[in-house]
Image (tube, rainbow, N blue to C red):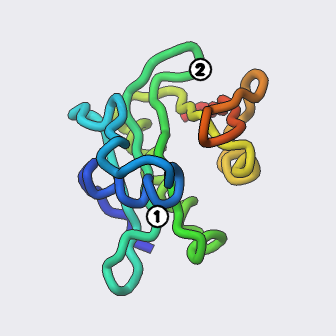
């Protein structure tokens, strides 16, 4: 599986389809997307269609210094290693740029995915309106 850098604009349609179907793709411009240190990556199928995407950018706070967000994998590619490959590329990027700890707001349904990647839950679950329950997770880089 080849993970490649893509533009922020390229990740938004899959963000919309998988993560936020109640919003338009052009509404999914997030803080940090245009940071010159950010990385957006994608994994394509044999036809060149993006099947997995994710983003990371510096976002220092109490849980870490780099944030992983917008991880999305099309349903038919889940369990194939696509998400794992995207996340590995994002964490490597943050580490190569001096990051020491990555964090994310994870949907509770994907806790096992992040736990297998070394993330741990921090704090109590919280609800994101129109999306559902989340937890903060973090791991050392």
Identify which residue is drawn at 40% across, 67% down: 43
**For numbered disc 1, what is the local secondary structure?**
strand
Q: Name the residue under label 2.
A: 63
> Nearer the N terminus, badge 1 or badge 2?
1
Identify which residue is drawn at 24% across, 35% down: 34
Q: Could you say where residue 125 lies in the image, as x and y percent from the top left?
A: 76, 29
Q: Is residue 104 above or below residue 89?
A: above
Q: Residue 4 occupies which quadrant of the picture?
A: bottom left
Quarter of the figure that contains the C terminus: top right
Identify which residue is drawn at 71% across, 37% down: 133
- Residue 33 falls left or right of residue 137: left
> How dense is the environment of label 2, judged by Cα within 10 Å: few (below 14), some, or many (20 and up)?
some
Q: Could you say where residue 1 lies in the image, as x and y percent from the top left?
A: 45, 74
**For numbered disc 2, what is the local secondary structure?**
loop
Q: Mark 1 points at which residue?
A: 52
- Using the numbered discs, state the Cα–Cα distance from disc 1 to disc 2 in whole angstroms: 25 Å
């Amino acid at each position: 599986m080849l993970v490649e850098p893509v533009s922020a604009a390229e990740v938004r349609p899959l963000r919309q389809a998988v993560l936020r179907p109640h919003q338009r793709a052009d509404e999914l411009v997030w803080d940090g997307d245009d940071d010159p240190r950010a990385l957006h990556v994608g994994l394509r199928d044999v036809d060149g269609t993006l099947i997995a995407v994710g983003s990371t950018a510096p976002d220092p706070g109490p849980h870490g210094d780099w944030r992983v967000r917008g991880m999305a994998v099309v349903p038919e590619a889940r369990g194939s290693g696509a998400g794992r490959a995207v996340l590995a590329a994002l964490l490597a990027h943050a580490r190569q740029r001096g990051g020491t700890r990555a964090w994310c707001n994870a949907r509770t349904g994907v806790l096992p995915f992040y736990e297998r990647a070394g993330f741990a839950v921090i704090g109590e679950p919280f609800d994101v309106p129109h999306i559902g329950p989340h937890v903060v997770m973090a791991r050392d880089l």
